[in-house]
Image (tube, rainbow, N blue to C red):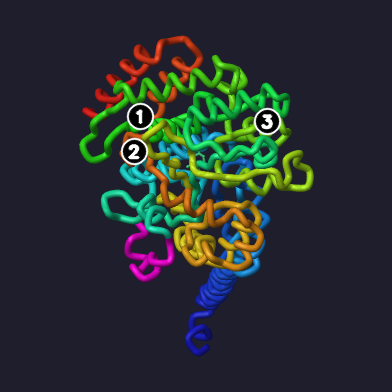
Amino acid sequence: MLFSRRFPFLSIFRFKRWRFLAVAIAALSSILISWAVMAQQPVTLRLLMTAPDAQPWREAMVAEFEQKYPNIRIEVVEGPNATNLIEDLYTSAFLLGDSPYDLVNMDVIWTPKFAAAGWLVDLTDRVTPEQLEGFSTVDIEGGKYNDRLYRLPLRSDAGVFYYRKDLLDKHGLQPPETFDELMEQSKLLQESGDVPWGYVWQGRQYEGLAAMFVEVLEGFGGFWVNPDTLEVGLDRPETINAINWLRSTVSEGVSPPGVTTYQEEETRRFFQSGQAAFLRSWPYVWPLANADDSEIKGKIGIKPMLHAQGQESGACLGGWGLAISKSSRHQEEAWQAVQFFSSVEPQRNYILEAGYVPSRKVLFSDPQVVQKFPHYPQLLEIVGTAVLRPPIAQYAQASDILQRYLSAALTNRMSPEEAMRAAANETRTLLKT
Ligand code: GLC
């Protein structure tokens, strides 16, 4: 006061200083307020999956998660039905650098490639060995690369052989065990006018073809790539026998010619509308084929895939799990989501909704699950015989080679020998690089 009385011109500065202070306080509080508002805004976690998977995901799990974690929203983006097309979409998103997906809904066959490329958060130190004990070992192994864990399994999967129990009973037949029996029974049922076609399988050029073929190959005693030695078995006689048998299903009129263009959903609709006696597919078919609107409700049975005389059968191991994208800006929220979706309760609801195979061991004998799905004991027996597609980092390219040449052989564009010689050579070159 005294000072300004002695130097009156200084009071202007004092006024300015107050004004400056007031403006600074206002600015600071508006920043703080907008931070607080932003902190309360829910974080959205995005993930991509096939359309048939998206519906049970949303219905069985997402609503419950969002209720439990009001600050996190889950955006399920529906993609195409083929797993390899979903993989391509994730891959191009990762290659562009800033992936729009926080969570990665991963097929078991993608782990080596995605982990080797450095696209996933390493989850190894976030889970204890005791926590991992709750899951089936094969499903955990499917999420590992170089002994590090990148994906927690949400559900398992395995190839299943479906048969029309009502038709077999009518003719006093037991379900077929061998590929030859399948042909004989198909022809009998077709000739007696019970069903127009015998057997449907996935013959289109896509990942489902490779999965189906692994089973036929196993049933003929062959192999694709030995993951330990990288030996390639595609040009061996067992592989040629497997292809010749698949070709014979069409040439002998047991499978419809269109089978070489079918994915899972085409084969399911075909079987479900009563047009075929036998089907190779995955467990998701069971609840749909037994729904009220199905022509074959209550008329089907399941068993492990077939084999050639003197050989053993094998189911292809499939399955899906969750990983976290390294470029996600919400990795902590994503981890909360991974933990929730892979825990027992949400998985039970998911299994009950879609008829999938659990990855949580306790659900194998869960009273609710077993009561709803009486075929569970057989399903578990099938999962026990599951064989892996080669767990190698170059799997996507190896599968692409097999799909191309196998499709050429199945559609008579190349002989099986010529096609598999080329496929084996390309695969060997790929594995050397
Ligand atoms: C199922 C399996 C998956 C496989 C795919 C092939 O979704 O779970 O592992 O790659 O079918 O179509």
> Looking at the picture, how far across and down is residue 265, in whole percent?
63, 34
| Circle 3/circle 2 CB separation < 8 Å | no
Residue that badge 2 annotates? 390
Residue 235 covered by magenta stretch? no
Label 3 within 8 A of ligand 1 by Cβ: no
The type of residue carrying mark 3 is: Phe
The type of residue carrying mark 1 is: Ala
Local packing at callout 1 (Cα closer than 10 Å; few below 14, some 14-19, many 20+) is many
**Badge 3 or badge 2: first in the primary sequence:** 3
> Looking at the picture, how far across and down is residue 64, in whole percent?
64, 65
Label 1 within 8 A of ligand 1 by Cβ: no
Residue that badge 3 annotates? 270
| Circle 1/circle 2 CB separation < 8 Å | yes
Res. 104 in view: no
Q: Which residues are magenta?
A: 121-135
Q: Secondary structure at mark 2?
A: loop
Marks 3 and 1, how far apart in space?
30 Å
The type of residue carrying mark 2 is: Pro
